[in-house]
Each structure stands twice: as structure tokens, then as C-alpha cells.
Amino acid sequence: MLFAAAMTQGMARFTNYLDSRHKVPMTTEVYMRAIVPIGVMFSMSLIFGNVAYMYLSVSFIQMLKATNTVATLLATWIFGLAPPNMKTLANVSTIVIGVGIASYAEINFNLAGFLFQAGGILFEATRLVMVQRLLSSADFKMDPMVSLYYYAPACAVINGVITLIIEVPKMTLADISNLGAGVLLANAFVAFCLNVSVVLLIGKTSAVVLTLCGVLKDILLVMASMAIFGDPVTIIQYFGYSIALGGLVYYRLGGEKLQQLGRQTRLTVGDYQREHPIRSRAVGLCATLAVIGVVVWTWLPVAPSLGV
């Protein structure tokens, strides 16, 4: 967050990307009352979420993050930003069921890590609702980059204080040297680019595209954690996570939008098959082989333990 604060301050000083901040009636009182609590929630979500990685696999954490939507929905009801809707609750309950199945089948389940990740999800949901309540006010109109301009310094200070108390007494220069300053800077730069890319993607396309990209990102993260870290994922977890992702897409897009997207996809695929018949068959064959390869590669380490 220190890197994000420095970058947004530089953008505000040397570019015109954050000029809309001048339209925000920000005072010290408003900052302490409205921005700092959001910074606290943001910092807590980062801290709890990062600690969870010490106990749980990347793939399982990504599965648990599918419940972010459910937690945010419940938070909007608690804060009175939206009236409770039982139909919506029934839709998102599919996500909970899917994550429950994936959690039940987790081989390396750890209660402490699960609680830390659950805490991070609750803090993140509270932060999002506080941001929504702030931005829904007629007095504030902030785009995501301007909000980052205000939140980042508060988060950097809070994280810095917690780091001084908890981490610094246990850290040595050897720890930083072994990790490498380049890795830390690269990590900070990637995190900042992520925030910028979200803004640019929404500006060039729509929130629907962002949602679909988010689902694709979740799937790729699970597969990458399996390939890079060797995290075990069972067939039951695949099943549960598929249910959760399906419920997540349905909740975010809705039935009508999914039908429209399906029609557009069929038309696009049909046009491509007519224009490039040989290439389309090759793509289909490669996709089929890739799916079979992933399933076999995942099943082989599990098969001996099942007596197969």
C-alpha cells in the first residue's frame, strides 16, 4: 500500500488522471470519519488474508474467496443499503453449498487458516459496503483511482504500525536479502497495476466483462497453484468449486444476461466455424485434450491412495 500511495501521489502531481479529486469535498473531519475506517477494514482484510496463506493452499483459499459475494450481500442488508431479498439469498446459497463441498473435501484443512480467511472475507465485505455507502452519497463522486488515492495512505500507515509491532521484531536484514528487494518491488508494482487495469477494463468494456474475467482468474489461480506448488485438489473439490462458480456467475449476471451472452457466444462460434472450419476443429481438439490432461494429471496422485 505504501507503493500504491506513492504512485497515486505521483499521478496526482504529474498527470491529469486524478483531477476529479478536486471535486471531492474532503476535509480532515470527513477523512477521519469516512476514509480512515475504510482503510482499517482494508488493512485488516489484507493482513488476515495474507496470514491465511501460511496455513492453507492457494487453491483452497481461492475456493473460499467465492463466498465474498455472499458476505458482501449480507453486509448490505445489515447496513441497510438494500432490503433483504429471499430470492437473491436462494441464488447465492448455491455458492455457499459449493464452497462447503470443496471445504469438506480439502485434504490439508487447517482450522486456524480457515478462520483467518473467513475474517479477511468479512473485513473485505464490510469495506466494500462502507465504500458503497460513502459513494452513494450525493456529496461524493469518486472513481476507483481517486478512492485509491485517498485510501492508500491510510492503509499504508495502519499496515506500517502493525508491521512495526508484530513483524519487525522478528525480521532481520537476512530475511529481506533472501527474499530480494526486487521481488518485493515487483509484487507491489503488480498489485498497483491490478488496480489500474480494473479501472481501464471497466472504462473500455463493462462490469460484465470484469465479472467474467474475475471468474476466469479464479479458475486459472487454482490451476496455477496445482502446477506450481503441487497443491492437491480432489475430484469432489472440483465438483464443489464448479457449483460455487456457477452460482457466482448466475448471481452476478442474472438469467436474462446469461441467455443473451449464450446467444451471442453461439452466433460468434458459428460464424468462426463457417469461416475457419479446419482451425475451429483444431481448437476444439486441443481444448478437449487439455481438459482430459488436467483431469488425468489431477487424478493420478489421488488414485493410489484410493486403491485404484
Image: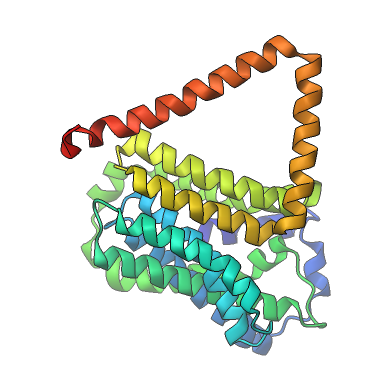
| For residue 301, side relative to residue 269 (left or right) | left
Residue 246 in sight from this viewpoint:
yes
- The picture quadrant where one finds residue 44 is bottom left
| Viewer-side residue, 178 vs 297 | 297
Is residue 262 or residue 11 the one in the foreground? 262
Considering every residue shown, the one lying at the far front of the view is 308
Q: Position of residue 236 (x, y in %)?
A: 35, 48
Q: Can residue 128 be seen in this view?
A: no
Residue 284: % across, % down: 60, 21
Report the residue at 64% width, 57% height from top.
250
Image coordinates for residue 118, horizontal then vertical, percent: 39, 69
Colour scheme: rainbow
The percent coordinates of residue 116 (x first, y second) are 34, 68
Give left or right: position of 86 versus 232. Answer: right
Vertical placement of 165 versus 96: above or below? below
Quarter-of-image position of residue 128: bottom right
| Residue 70 against residue 259 in the figure, above or below | below
Between 169 and 255, the residue placed more toward the observer is 255
Q: Which residue is drawn at 62% across and 54% down?
A: 249
